[in-house]
Amino acid sequence: MNPKNQNSNFEYPSKSQLNILLEHYQNGRFEDAEKVAKNLTQKYPKDIFAWKVLSAIFWQTGRKSQGIEISIKTISLSPNDDEAHSNLGVMLLEQGRLEEAEASLINAISLNSKNPKNHYNLGVILKELGRLKDAKLCYDKAISFEPNYFKAHNNLGDIFRTLGKLEEAKSSFKIAISLQPDYAEAHVNLGAVLVDMERLDEAVFYFKKAISLKPNYSKAKHMLAALTGETTKTAPQEYVESLFDNYAQKFERALVSNLEYKIPKILTEIIIEDSKTNSLGSVIDLGCGTGLFGEEIKKFCDSIIGIDLSKRMLDQAKKKNIYNELIKEDIVTYLSNNYFDFDYFISLDVFIYVGDLSNVFKLIKFRNKKSGKLAFSVENHDGESFFLERSGRYSHSKTYIEDLCERFGYRISYFKKLNLRKEKNQYINGALYILEF
């Protein structure tokens, strides 16, 4: 944002007043900046810059809805300000309101078609909407106006990787790194492509480089552990949350249509056939995602609650009006902080990101007020415990599940090995369990 003294008359603040506001904001003195911005918007209500800064202050200090409201007001005062439309679009994007965000960025581009940032942000939105070819065109456009736009090259690489064009992806990530050598995200993305290409030693190099640039980079550490044979206890929360936030819009289309994922329907049929009553009672869907299992099981439940770490996955589930309640929280944290009265605990394609399941088993058994059932899927392996695969997901052996059952007082009432879904044109071997406690 740059302060512009639109008019020298009394209706607009002086450049020095705007510079004071900007100085407070840029130095993180948000409380002081807010006081100045509110004073300026009250005294000079036609000044667009003060409204823009006030919106940004609300956003930066966690008052998201107020930030959006002020941004909309700013546009009403200056409908032809492309930056105002762009700012609103970015806010809506971060809130997962993608169709509204798209409209805002289209408005921004119509007002200023040569601003590479507008094309870049529209590309981000279209990528999340699953419109990869349109997103690619936006990144290409941003790069045409600003060839050194390293973030656009990085995101273009992500598009190529999603489309399976690994050489093009590798090239784009390398360009991003050449333009911004300390850009840790591009190093991680290049490492991930090299894993896809089975060039594991090179991938390790780039994951290590990312960690050296950003020592707390959880995704890089997790993927490095997966490649070097270190089996950690669980995937980092921020890694899982980011993974599914980015996947939310295209999750069902990719999983069900392209990867032949049928586990929710299969498990529902097994549970209903096994049930001796007309209703399953109360059900909790741990890691509910977009509600694939909820859709299948809802009509057989008295009530169903969904828990998930990803806000954008929950936003998709909410649209279906399936769950009596949806809660954004890590499942172990949720289980640790509550007592329960559920008949069924369900967790499909979730333990592949947990690894060590001992806390989950213990908390369900000792915090539920009555006997119940725990049903879940895992990726299967034939070892003794759980294992962090090169994919960054965990696999669990039947021996490990049996040991947990003996330790915490569960009984396996159902077990079956089966194909979970496809990945790289091959089926992933997994298993379904139903445990009684």
Image: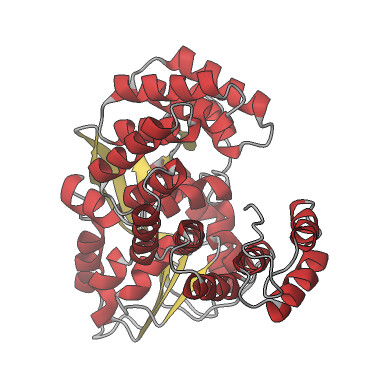
Position of residue 163 in the picture relative to residue 211 (left or right)? left
Q: How many callouts does the rendering have?
A: 0
Most foreground residue, 104 or 255:
104
Position of residue 255 in the picture relative to residue 303 (left or right)? left
Please identify the quarter of the rendering in which residue 293 is found: bottom left
Q: Residue furthest front?
A: 9
Vertical arrangement, residue 418 with respect to residue 190, above or below? below
Most foreground residue, 147 or 94:
147
What kind of colouring is applied to the model shown?
secondary structure
Position of residue 283 in the picture relative to residue 279 (left or right)? right
Residue drawn at point x = 53 percent, y = 33 percent: 185
Most foreground residue, 421 or 75:
75
Q: Is residue 115 visible?
A: yes
Residue drawn at point x = 59 percent, y = 70 percent: 67
Vertical arrangement, residue 336 with respect to residue 386, above or below? below
Q: Position of residue 192 (x, y in %)?
A: 43, 28
Q: Position of residue 411 (x, y in %)?
A: 42, 61
Q: Position of residue 86 (x, y in %)?
A: 47, 57
Q: Position of residue 78 (x, y in %)?
A: 49, 69
Residue drawn at point x = 79 percent, y = 72 percent: 35
Q: Is residue 435 visible?
A: no
Vertical arrangement, residue 430 with respect to residue 327, above or below? above
Please identify the quarter of the rendering in which residue 379 is found: top left
